[in-house]
Image (spheres, helix red, strand yellow):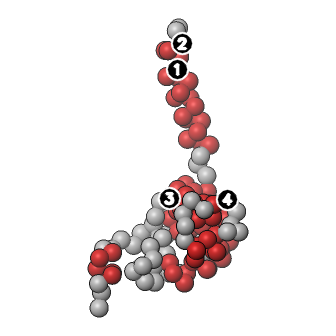
Amino acid sequence: MNTLSMIKPIALLALCGFAISSTSVLARGPANPEAAKKLAEPCQACHGANGVATAPIYPHLAGQYADYLARALHEYRDGGRNNPIMAVYVEKLSDQDIAELAAYFSSMPAQVDDLYDRMNAD
């Protein structure tokens, strides 16, 4: 068997191993829902108790993809996204805290609406 024909099976095995190992808290919901709910309390002022934003200028978090939420929180914490309000809330979150929050909000029922309608509501 030549080297090139061995690459595909090796790549497939590596991909399967990654997929199996990445079934983390993000994929199954928060490991500790009560702890996640407590972590999410400061978020409620803007993003609502049920993950539905309290004002049109804030995004809904309910039903968002967990990996998207986790990435956004990491970026706010690590300076990749610049928002002074979010920076204060996420500066002391651990990676596990971020995973728990992402899983918590992603496990909520999605709330989809039209941002234009929210911004122009009477």
In the displayed orientation, state which residue is furthest to the top. 1
- Is residue 9 shown left or right of residue 121? right
Q: Quadrant of the C terminus?
A: bottom left
Q: Which residue in the protein does label 2 denote?
A: 3
Chain-order first, disc 3 or disc 1: 1
> Residue 5 placed where, x, y %?
49, 15
In the displayed orientation, state which residue is furthest to the bottom. 122
Badge 3: few (under 14), some or many (20 or more) residues near its Cα, within 10 Å? few
Give the Cα distance between marks 2 and 3. 37 Å
Compared with residue 6, is residue 38 higher up or lower down, i.e. above or below?
below
Quadrant hosting residue 33: bottom right
Q: Which residue in the protein does label 1 denote?
A: 7
Quadrant hosting residue 14: top right
Say which of 39 and 76 sits in front: 76
Compared with residue 10, is residue 32 higher up or lower down, i.e. above or below?
below
Three-letter code, disc 2:
Thr
- Is residue 38 shown left or right of residue 27? right
Q: Which residue in the protein does label 3 denote?
A: 68
Chain-order first, disc 2 or disc 4: 2
Give the Cα distance between marks 3 and 1. 31 Å
Q: Residue at x 61, y 52 (%)?
A: 24
Three-letter code, disc 3:
Tyr
Compared with residue 86, is residue 19 higher up or lower down, i.e. above or below?
above
Q: Which residue in the protein does label 4 denote?
A: 95
